[in-house]
């Protein structure tokens, strides 16, 4: 069978491109541990506003210096509107929505997740630079989407005793 030279070149080029794609997926998923969150936990979106965890969503500081942040993402706000977390300690976010899908992106950090009604989105990260960060919804969720934001304040010396800042 006679295959034209250009036909052969394109066949090889296609094969190489596929090999590069597969290799890059394997590399990022293994060597760089770039994986989607594996946490699957469901919650009834009809009753979530009255649930123990999300009725008064807040930051909980633990004795080891880490923090758990409970967030309700809803049309068109995040609760709490200001999230204060300790610098340089593990911070676990637990979030859900009572209405539609929202995004939760902490601008200029690696914190970025989708918040889906019926599920609890959970991820843990750490903030090494103190300061104020903007949190935005990055999933179009309705007419007030552009006004759905909150702030994350990363502070030094945030202690577990009632969330008060301790003297430096
Ligand atoms: Cu919530 Cu866009």
Image (cartoon, rainbow, N blue to C red):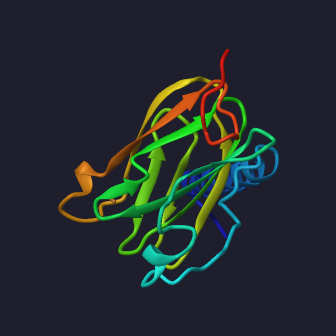
Q: What x and y, as percent, mark residue 33? A: 77, 49
The correct choice, above or below, for 66 with respect to 2 in the image is above
Q: Quadrant of the N terminus?
A: bottom right
Q: What x and y, as percent, mark residue 132? A: 46, 28
- Please name the residue shown 60% across and 34% down the image: 164
The correct choice, above or below, for 120 with respect to 4 in the image is below
In the image, farthest residue toward the top: 168
Q: Quadrant of ligand 1?
A: bottom left
The correct choice, above or below, for 135 with respect to 7 in the image is above
- Please name the residue shown 47% across and 71% down the image: 116
Between 117 and 78, the one nearer to me in the picture = 78
Between 53 and 135, the one nearer to me in the picture = 53
Between 126 and 53, the one nearer to me in the picture = 53
Q: What x and y, as percent, mark residue 12? A: 66, 53
- Please name the residue shown 76% across and 43% down the image: 32
Q: Quadrant of the C terminus?
A: top right
Q: Is residue 95 left or right of residue 91?
A: left
- Asked where in the image residue 31 lies, by quadrant, the reply is top right
The correct choice, above or below, for 156 with respect to 1 in the image is above
- Please name the residue shown 53% across and 38% down the image: 84
How many numbered callouts? Answer: 0
């Amino acid at each position: 069978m006679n295959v034209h030279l250009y036909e052969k070149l394109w066949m090889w080029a296609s094969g190489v491109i596929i090999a590069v794609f597969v290799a890059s997926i394997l590399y990022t998923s293994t060597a760089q541990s770039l994986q989607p969150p594996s946490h699957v936990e469901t919650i009834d979106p009809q009753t979530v506003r009255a649930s123990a965890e999300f009725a008064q969503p807040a930051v909980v500081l633990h004795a080891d210096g880490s923090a758990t942040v409970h967030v309700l993402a809803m049309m068109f706000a995040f609760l709490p509107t200001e999230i204060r977390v300790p610098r340089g300690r593990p911070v676990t976010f637990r979030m859900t929505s009572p209405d539609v899908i929202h995004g939760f992106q902490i601008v200029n950090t690696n914190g970025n997740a989708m918040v889906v009604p019926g599920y609890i989105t959970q991820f843990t990260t750490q903030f090494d630079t103190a300061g104020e960060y903007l949190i935005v919804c990055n999933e179009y969720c309705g007419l007030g989407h552009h006004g759905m934001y909150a702030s994350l304040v990363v502070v030094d010396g945030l202690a577990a005793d009632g969330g008060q800042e301790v003297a430096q």
